[in-house]
């Protein structure tokens, strides 16, 4: 696993998403059914998708152990009317610390640890929103690329 860390100003990304309130540690079992609903919707809307990636947005709570509102989404080209659970949203904008994780998904927590260490060393705090942008699928988990974005205060 390798992780590169950078600070950038990020701009909103349009998403089609399904929101779930997920207990810590349960993202792995929640994202699949939610994203399947998004992809089913996207396939029924010509021109809504043009190669965008899966993006999972986390809205942190200040309460220890609280369920985390998560938007399990896919980048899209435009906004649209809500259809069932699928709604139009976007990622936040502002200054963010970005970590690019290269390696298997089960090691993403290591990238988050490096980001948290960077924030502590640099005296920065999270604004309570983070998201993961998943790269193109690859048969080799060691080649998977996930961009982790943590909005800064």
Image: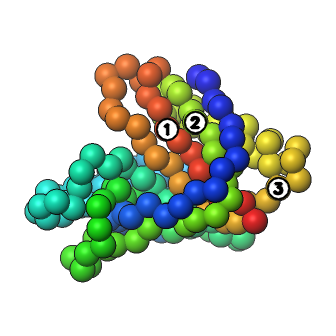
Q: In the rendered structure, which disc, 1 or 2, sits on the residue that comes first in sequence?
A: 2
**CA–CA distance between discs 2 and 3?**
19 Å
What label does residue 124 carry, if any? 3
| Relative depth, front residue between 100 and 6 | 6
Asked whether disc 1 touches disc 2, contact meaning CB atoms under 8 Å apart, the reply is yes
Q: Is residue 9 above or below residue 83?
A: above
Q: What element carries label 2?
A: strand
Q: Is residue 102 left or right of residue 35?
A: right
Q: Where is residue 56 in the image (x, y as percent from the top left)?
A: 45, 55
| Relative depth, front residue between 9 and 139 | 9
Quarter placement of the C terminus: bottom right
Q: Which quadrant holds residue 99?
A: top right
Q: Position of residue 12 (x, y in %)?
A: 49, 64
Question: Is residue 24 at least partly visible in the picture?
Answer: no
Q: Which quadrant holds residue 148?
A: top right
Asked whether disc 2 touches disc 3, contact meaning CB atoms under 8 Å apart, the reply is no
Q: Residue at x 72, y 70 (%)?
A: 62
Q: Which residue is drawn at 66% across and 50% down?
A: 8
Q: How crowded is mark 2: few (under 14 residues within 10 Å), some or many (20 or more)?
A: some
Q: Residue at x 35, y 47 (%)?
A: 53
What label does residue 146 carry, if any? 1
**CA–CA distance between discs 1 and 2?**
6 Å
Q: Is mark 3 on a helix, strand or loop?
A: loop
Q: Position of residue 78 (x, y in %)?
A: 29, 68
Q: In the rendered structure, which disc, 2 or 3, sits on the residue that comes first in sequence?
A: 2
**Residue position for label 2:** 100
| Relative depth, front residue between 122 and 10 | 10
Question: Is residue 120 at least partly visible in the picture?
Answer: yes
């Amino acid at each position: 696993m390798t992780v590169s860390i950078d600070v950038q100003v990020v701009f909103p990304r349009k998403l089609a998403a399904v929101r779930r309130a997920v207990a810590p540690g349960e993202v792995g079992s929640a994202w699949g059914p939610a994203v399947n609903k998004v992809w089913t919707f996207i396939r029924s809307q010509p021109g809504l998708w043009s190669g965008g990636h899966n993006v999972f947005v986390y809205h942190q709570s200040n309460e220890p152990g609280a369920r985390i509102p998560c938007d399990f989404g896919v980048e899209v080209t435009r906004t649209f009317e809500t259809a069932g659970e699928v709604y139009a949203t976007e990622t936040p904008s502002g200054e963010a610390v970005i970590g690019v994780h290269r390696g298997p998904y089960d090691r993403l927590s290591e990238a988050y640890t490096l980001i948290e260490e960077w924030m502590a060393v640099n005296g920065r705090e999270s604004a309570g929103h983070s998201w993961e942008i998943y790269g193109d699928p690859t048969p080799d988990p060691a080649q998977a690329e996930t961009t982790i974005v943590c909005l800064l205060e």
